[in-house]
Image (spheres, grey):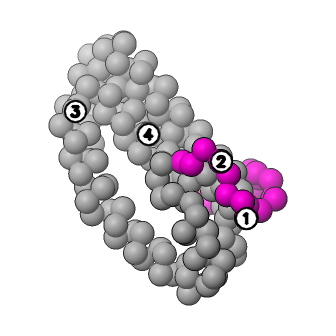
């Protein structure tokens, strides 16, 4: 909400931000369509290149919204919170939980695939299941996409105020 209150978009930066947000949303939908939480170590789709593609998509959304709103300070604060608090906390918590559930399979994947910046080649042990819309729905990513589009629309309306 703070971002929208202080937003000062213009057409050029809104367009750049819009593209970053669409890219972030696309990454999130691609990832959610492969994710089977707590049933397997997901290694297909974007998970063959980066361990946390949902975070990567969120990161792109954060940058996109801040660029579109012309809010460098909010971007800096958001990045600091993500990098200094959220990412290390979630990494410890999720890694421990996944190690308990999947053991050595998780350890191999965890060692082989980077957390946030994708590798250029896919993980050698990647699975074979295809992307599925049903997984997007199971992971509630359609709701995240709807909220993101509403945020884009609201920010777009600020162009005219």
Magenta run includes residue 50: no
> Do the CB atoms of the residues marked 4 and 3 lie less than 8 Å apart?
no
> Do the CB atoms of the residues marked 1 and 2 lie less than 8 Å apart?
no
Per the rendered image, the range of residues in magenta is 118-140
Nearer-N-terminus badge (1/3): 3
Q: Which mark is residue 121?
A: 2
Nearer-N-terminus badge (4/1): 4
> Mark 4, mark 1: which one is toward the viewer?
1
Q: Which mark is residue 60?
A: 4
Residue indicated by mark 1: 125
Between the residue at mark 2 and the residue at mark 4, the CA separation in whole angstroms equals 21 Å
Tag 2's secondary structure? loop
Residue 8 point in image, percent of width and height? 23, 22
Tag 3's secondary structure? helix
Between the residue at mark 4 and the residue at mark 1, the CA separation in whole angstroms equals 27 Å
User: Looking at the picture, does residue 87 appear above or below residue 25?
Assistant: below
Nearer-N-terminus badge (3/2): 3
Between the residue at mark 4 and the residue at mark 3, the CA separation in whole angstroms equals 14 Å
């Amino acid at each position: 909400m703070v971002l929208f209150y202080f937003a000062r978009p213009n057409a050029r930066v809104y367009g750049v931000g819009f593209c970053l947000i669409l890219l972030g949303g696309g990454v999130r939908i691609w990832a959610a369509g492969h994710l089977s939480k707590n049933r397997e170590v997901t290694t297909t789709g974007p998970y063959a290149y980066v361990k946390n593609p949902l975070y990567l998509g969120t990161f792109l959304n954060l940058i996109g919204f801040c660029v579109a709103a012309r809010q460098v300070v909010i971007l800096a604060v958001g990045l600091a919170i993500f990098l200094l608090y959220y990412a290390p906390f979630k990494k410890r918590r999720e890694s421990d939980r996944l190690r308990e559930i999947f053991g050595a399979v998780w350890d191999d994947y965890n060692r082989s695939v980077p957390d946030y910046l994708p590798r250029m080649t896919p993980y050698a042990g990647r699975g074979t299941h295809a992307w599925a819309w049903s997984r997007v729905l199971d992971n509630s990513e359609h709701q995240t996409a709807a909220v993101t589009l509403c945020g884009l629309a609201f920010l777009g309306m600020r162009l005219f105020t």
